[in-house]
Image (cartoon, rainbow, N blue to C red):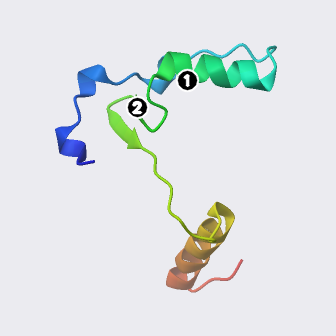
Amino acid sequence: MDKRMIDRSALKDIRDVNIDMNLPREERMKQYVKQIGDPYCYLDGDVVVEIGYADTKVTLHDCLVSYANSINMAKGTLW
């Protein structure tokens, strides 16, 4: 989806979502989806957040470690 084509007025702001943490996990998830609408595209203030998933075996952890290593290598430092 082209972010320039998104109708911002139709998106919910995640900062307005309030979840009762005393509820069981499944009920908290239902509350979140009910309040946010589209959990894959929402606002965080003025920023449109769009979430997608790739069909790959690379984990988020792997990506974050790789990213951190690339920053450290650019600075010439190690962990």
User: Residues under labels 1 and 2: Cα distance?
Assistant: 11 Å
Q: Is residue 65 above or below residue 46?
A: below
Q: Residue at x 55, y 23 (%)?
A: 33
- Tell me the quarter of the image containing the C terminus: bottom right
Q: Is residue 22 found left or right of 36 in the rendered image?
A: right
Residue sitting nearer the eye, 41 or 68: 41
The answer to whether 46 appears left or right of 61 in the picture is left
- In front: label 1 or label 2: 1
Crowd rating for badge 1 (residues with CA inside 10 Å; few <14, some 14–19, many 20+):
some
8 left or right, relative to 53 = left
Above-or-below relation of 58 to 22: below
What residue does disc 2 label? 42
Compared with residue 58, is residue 36 higher up or lower down, i.e. above or below? above
**In the rendered structure, which amino acid carries the disc numbered 2?**
Tyr
x, y (%) of residue 27?
A: 72, 18
Within 10 angstroms of label 2, few (less than 14), some, or many (20 or more) residues?
many
Instruction: Judge left or right: residue 2 versus residue 18.
Output: left
Q: Residue at x 29, y 21 (%)?
A: 10
Q: Which residue is mark 1?
A: 33
The answer to whether 61 is drawn above or below residue 47 in the figure is: below
Residue 17 rendering spot, x and y as whole percentages: 54, 18
Q: Tell me the quarter of the picture where residue 3 sits.
A: top left
Nearest to the observer: residue 26 or residue 3: 26
Amino acid type, mark 1: Val
Q: Residue at x 23, y 35 (%)?
A: 6
Going from N to C along the chain, the mark reached first, 1 or 2, is 1
- Percent coordinates x, y for residue 32 in the rendering: 59, 22
Residue 9 versus residue 69: which sits nearer the camera? 9
Secondary structure of residue under mark 1: helix
